Image: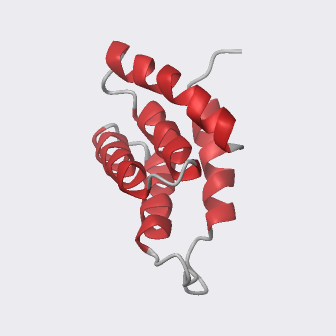
Amino acid sequence: MSLVISKGFKPYFNQAIAIKPEYAGAYLARGVARYQILDRQGAFQDAQVAEKLFTSQNNSPGTQTAQAFIKELQTPVNDKVSPGSPSFLDFLGSLGSVLLQFFPF
């Protein structure tokens, strides 16, 4: 996702959250958009909210995805997540699966 696209989608995530504040997927997606525009603090805050909401909704895949994202955000920029831990690519794959559950087709 490019920086321009990430910035462009952020208002849509804000609108989704305003309409449905318990929409964990919107928080997670907005967190990813924030991550893409280098707003790590905002991304971390959104990931924490998403994790809390996914947990309260008994959504294990969502909770695991949010936790993987949080771990990525807590890893210093120059370090890598330890082997055996989910990688950021694993996270993105999981995110796609989780978000697809929320979008009507």
Residue 46, image x and y in percent?
37, 45
Q: How many numbered callouts?
A: 0
* Quadrant in which the C terminus is drawn: top right
Q: Quadrant of residue 70?
A: bottom left
Q: Residue at x 47, y 57 (%)?
A: 64
Q: Residue at x 58, y 71 (%)?
A: 86
Q: Residue at x 60, y 46 (%)?
A: 95
Q: Residue at x 55, y 86 (%)?
A: 82
Q: Is residue 40 left or right of residue 80?
A: left
Residue 84, image x and y in percent?
59, 83
Residue 91, image x and y in percent?
60, 58
Residue 98, image x and y in percent?
58, 40
Q: Quadrant of residue 102?
A: top right
Relative height, residue 6 to residue 17 (above, below): below
Q: Is residue 17 left or right of residue 62?
A: left
* Quadrant in which the N terminus is drawn: top right
